[in-house]
Amino acid sequence: MDDAEIRAKFEKAWRATLPAKPGLDNHQMIDGIHDGSIKAMYVFGEEMSLVDSNANYVSAALAKLDFFVMQEIFFSETCRFADVILPASPSLEKEGTFTSTERRIQRLYRAMEPLGDSRPDWQIIQDIANRLGAGWSYKHPSEIYKEIAPLTPLMAGVTYERLEGYKSLQWPVAEDGADQPLLYTRKFDFPDGKARLFPVPWSEPSNQQDAEYDLHLNNGRLLEHFHEGNMTYRTEGIKAKTPCTFVEVSPELATERGIQTGSWVQLTSPYGKVRAQAVVTARVQGKELYMPMNSVEEPVNRLTSSYTDKETHTPAYKETSVHLHLLGENGSNPLPRTNPRFGHPTPQKGVEVERKWKRQDYSQPGNELVQIKTNER
């Protein structure tokens, strides 16, 4: 498609989507695609087809979209559903800021030029907006922040100048630049300064075990990988330590069902099925199973449901009941001997960053660092 065709299709599908309610969570949006109220979607930086729970349902929705735009730094699994893929630049190839889950805003600097046809997200979005008639003319992300700050009380005092030299701020940031590393030391953000507490009644797990789905499957991350591994699996050294996903089985369940480390099993839930090798370990007990989420070939979210917490709308990732079928095939341990589990780690209490600060060879960031400068485009 040429530019005119892309614009026409984008506008048609997007206008059909406008009546949908704003502020929807992921599963409400997926439901909207299935019921026809959402016709188009523009996603950047999220692997929806693997990370969202009930992955088969999500993938079926993405395939239904009239028009789907993905903005990514590499060709992800979700990109396979896209009509248009916009190549974005990773953090080392662009200027901007990161805001972490501890509310810390950090400035980042471009260390190298964007590869190929990729560009920073803000440039891509600005070009699309201008093709639709916006008339934006930003030259640098700092100009965008200057517009954000006066419109966002929590960010009122954030400027690129105050973040210069690897300094950071934790929102809320007052106009004079004073931030709050620790929140609510004097009052809460209500007119009377008092907190609002709401009792939440206990609710039963959404997927209970029964005669057919008699095992509880827990899932989560691995030390070696970030999230589902769609970035870290591209690093050969990391992939060598965890080459594939696996399911942890307790010694008692393994004895009961004739499972050994390396046995191939099929896990089936009401929502889908996956195939993986077993690792017999005392890290789980009884009828509890654990499966890492880092897999493209056999993602655990093919087994999870669309149920969400009614207060937070968080998917019920941990509430999955499954049936385990022993396939009768055996292989080697899916965890190679180079995996850290087979080492002898020295226990410590958390990160213990204070120990690093006390080392004689440690210097505080920003004191003697050389800033790499690149030519602005």
Image (cartoon, rainbow, N blue to C red):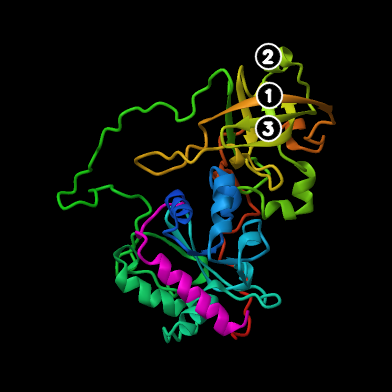
Q: CA distance from mark 2 to mark 3?
A: 29 Å
Q: Amino acid at mark 1?
A: Val
- Residue position marked by numbered label 2 in the rendering: 252
Looking at the rendered structure, the secondary structure element under dot 2 is helix
- Residue position marked by numbered label 1 in the rendering: 249
Looking at the rendered structure, the secondary structure element under dot 3 is loop
Between discs 2 and 3, the one toward the N terminus? 2
Q: Quadrant of residue 47?
A: bottom right
Q: Is residue 78 visible?
A: yes
Q: CA distance from mark 2 to mark 1?
A: 8 Å
- Residue position marked by numbered label 3 in the rendering: 346
Q: Position of residue 246 (x, y in %)?
A: 71, 34
Q: CA distance from mark 3 to mark 1?
A: 26 Å
Q: Position of residue 327 (x, y in %)?
A: 77, 27
Is residue 21 part of the magenta span, yes or no? Answer: yes
Between discs 3 and 1, the one toward the N terminus? 1
In the image, the segment drawn in magenta is 1-26
Q: Nearer the viewer, mark 2 or mark 3?
A: 2
Q: Position of residue 200 (x, y in %)?
A: 30, 33
Q: Position of residue 136 (x, y in %)?
A: 43, 84
Q: Is residue 293 above or below residue 250?
A: below
Q: Please say if the residues under marks 2 and 1 sit with CB atoms less than 8 Å apart.
A: no
